[in-house]
């Protein structure tokens, strides 16, 4: 059981929309890598992929029985929407936002933080690895 986890998420689409994937890297409170995960999403936009990555991260954190989460994303718009600073106007994103909101009820606390892309290399590499595996000609 991990009480607090630091989770880096990234979502990406090749083409917008296009083949998309979610990447997640999970660390414990001491900074030790707990696991890295990726998931092929099919056709999606970049923002849909970013949201799906957060959903995937919350599912993994639930499996790990975490209570407190600190999430780090390089998508400023998604962080601002999840922190309720920006409205979610796109209906596809709104339904994903609701899924995240519902999943977040399983945790004592969740923080969403924006980070520069350079600090999100592990989650980003998971996205690209997954896309490479699933989009070979």
Image (cartoon, grey):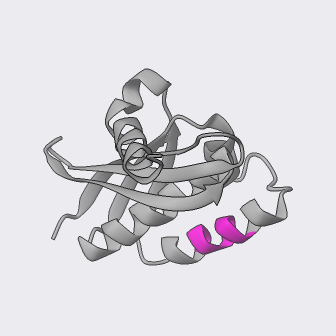
72 versus 41 height, above or below? above
Closer to us: 85 or 41:
41
Q: Which quarter of the picture shows residue 118?
A: top left
**How many labels, in total?**
0
Quarter containing the N terminus: bottom left
Main SS, magenta residues: helix
Which portion, as a residue range, is magenta?
Answer: 95-101
The image shows residue 54 at horizontal and vertical percentages of: 50, 57
Picture layout, residue 27 above or below residue 55: above
User: Any magenta on residue 98?
Assistant: yes
Q: Residue at x 66, y 67 (%)?
A: 96
Q: Quick one: 34 or 135, which is closer to the camera? A: 135
Residue located 50% across and 70% down the image? 104
| Quadrant of residue 122 within the rendered picture | top left
Residue that appears at 58% across and 51% down: 19
Q: Position of residue 27 (x, y in %)?
A: 23, 48
Q: Residue furthest right?
A: 89
User: Residue 132: within the magenta?
Assistant: no
Image position, residue 79 (x, y; %): 61, 44
* Left or right, residue 50 beside residue 44: left
Q: Image height check: is 80 above or below 134?
A: above
* Residue 31 visible in the shown view: yes
Query: In the current view of this chain or complex, which residue is farthest to the front?
Result: 137
Relative placement, left or right, of 71 versus 97 is left
Quarter occupied by residue 31: top left
Q: Residue 68 at x, y = what percent?
A: 34, 61
81 to the left or right of 21: right
Q: Is residue 83 visible?
A: no
Q: Nearer the viewer, residue 49 or 7?
A: 49
């Amino acid at each position: 059981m991990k009480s607090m986890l630091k989770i880096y998420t990234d979502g990406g689409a090749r083409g917008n929309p296009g083949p998309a994937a979610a990447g997640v890297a999970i660390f414990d409170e001491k900074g030790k890598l707990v696991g890295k995960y990726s998931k092929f999403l099919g056709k999606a936009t970049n923002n849909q992929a970013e949201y799906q990555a957060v959903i995937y991260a919350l599912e993994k954190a639930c499996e790990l029985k975490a209570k407190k989460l600190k999430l780090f994303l390089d998508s400023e718009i998604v962080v601002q929407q999840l922190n309720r600073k920006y409205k979610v106007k796109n209906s596809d994103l709104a339904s994903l936002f609701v899924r995240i909101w519902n999943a977040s009820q399983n945790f004592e606390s969740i923080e969403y933080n924006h980070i520069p892309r350079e600090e999100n290399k592990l989650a980003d590499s998971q996205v690209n690895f997954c896309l490479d595996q699933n989009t070979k000609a």
